[in-house]
């Protein structure tokens, strides 16, 4: 069961620099003192919201990993996105619609739960918040467009390598980075079989491009991996 830990506030939030409230100055943060979203913890595999539910909240991911899943009319489901710290999700409900996908915790997850009715008021009185929300909406569209291009134009090896390179980007070489998806889920996200994922990961480990152990990935030779699959620098 979801567990409410506390009420949060932007003035004391450790992740505010990567949230939609990042650009507010001290005076503006003080002006939204009454806005105190609930901090909720979810256990692994718990559903944060269901596809088709009335959209009442948006969420900021404080800690952990969340997968976004779309379910078809025939019951088949597909992972469409993987979220991590600082990601803002569920905000499609601002347009007055139901959730178009489900959000599921991959490990122990902590979120800020933001009432959409309050967010609507805040973005009207604080243009910086609306700007940040718009920026995240555009980033989401860009990710979706990039994924469509990859699924339609790239071969399986390119898709998998591109995903790993993006996931490890921003970390120092040789750093172990948590990757909470199993091989079947990676294949589901990228539109390839589990056998294909396993084969390429084994090949790339043997060639010294990556390391992999216990839900973690290590990018050892990004340039070599790019060359091996034909990705431009």
Image (cartoon, rainbow, N blue to C red):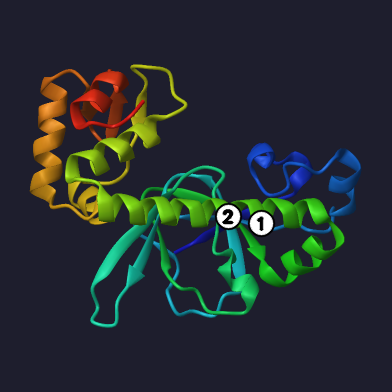
Looking at the picture, does residue 121 appear above or below residue 223?
below
Mark 1: give few (<14), some (14-19) or many (20+) Cα within 10 Å: few
Query: Is 48 on the left or on the right of 229, as rendered?
Result: right
Query: Is 135 on the left or on the right of 76, as rendered?
Result: right
Residue 145 visible to the viewer: yes
Q: Which mark is residue 134?
A: 1
Query: Is 87 on the left or on the right of 228, as rendered?
Result: right
Looking at the picture, does residue 2 appear above or below residue 202?
below
Q: Could you say which quadrant of the image residue 55 lies in?
A: bottom right
221 and 121: which one is in front? 221
Mark 2: give few (<14), some (14-19) or many (20+) Cα within 10 Å: few
Circle 1 sits in a helix, a strand or a loop, which is it? Answer: helix
Looking at the picture, does residue 173 appear above or below residue 190?
above
Outermost bottom residue: 73
Q: Which mark is residue 63?
A: none
The quadrant the C terminus occupies is: top left
Residue at screen point 29% across, 32% down = 231
Query: Is 78 on the left or on the right of 10, as rendered?
Result: left
Residue 7 visible to the viewer: no
Q: Position of residue 23 (x, y in %)?
A: 77, 42
Residue at screen point 11% across, 40% down = 198
Looking at the picture, does residue 4 appear above or below residue 13?
below
Q: Position of residue 96 (x, y in %)?
A: 62, 79
30 and 134: which one is in front? 134
Residue at screen point 79% across, 42% down = 11
The quadrant the N terminus occupies is: bottom left
Label 2 sits on residue: 138
- Label 2, label 1: how many angstroms apart (C-alpha)? 6 Å
Q: Could you say which quadrant of the image residue 179 lies in?
A: top left
């Amino acid at each position: 069961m979801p567990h409410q830990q506390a009420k949060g506030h932007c003035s004391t939030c450790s992740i505010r620099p990567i949230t939609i409230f990042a650009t507010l100055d001290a005076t503006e943060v003080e002006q939204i003192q009454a806005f105190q979203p609930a901090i909720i913890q979810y256990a692994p595999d718990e559903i944060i919201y269901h596809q088709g539910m009335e959209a009442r909240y948006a969420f900021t991911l404080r800690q952990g990993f969340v997968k976004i899943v779309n379910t078809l009319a025939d019951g088949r489901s597909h992972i469409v996105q993987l979220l991590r710290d600082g990601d803002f999700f569920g905000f499609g409900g601002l347009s007055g619609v139901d959730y178009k996908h489900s959000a599921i915790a991959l490990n122990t997850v902590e979120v800020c739960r933001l009432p959409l009715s309050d967010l609507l008021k805040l973005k009207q009185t604080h243009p910086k918040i609306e700007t940040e929300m718009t920026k995240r909406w555009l980033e989401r569209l860009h990710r979706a467009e990039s994924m469509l291009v990859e699924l339609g134009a790239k071969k399986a090896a390119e898709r998998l390598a591109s995903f790993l390179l993006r996931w490890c980007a921003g970390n120092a070489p040789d750093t172990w980075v948590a990757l909470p998806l199993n091989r079947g889920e990676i294949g589901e996200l990228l539109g390839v079989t589990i056998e294909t994922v396993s084969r390429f990961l084994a090949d790339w480990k043997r060639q010294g491009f990556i390391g992999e152990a216990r839900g973690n990935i290590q990018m050892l030779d990004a340039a070599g991996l790019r060359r091996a699959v034909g990705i431009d620098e």
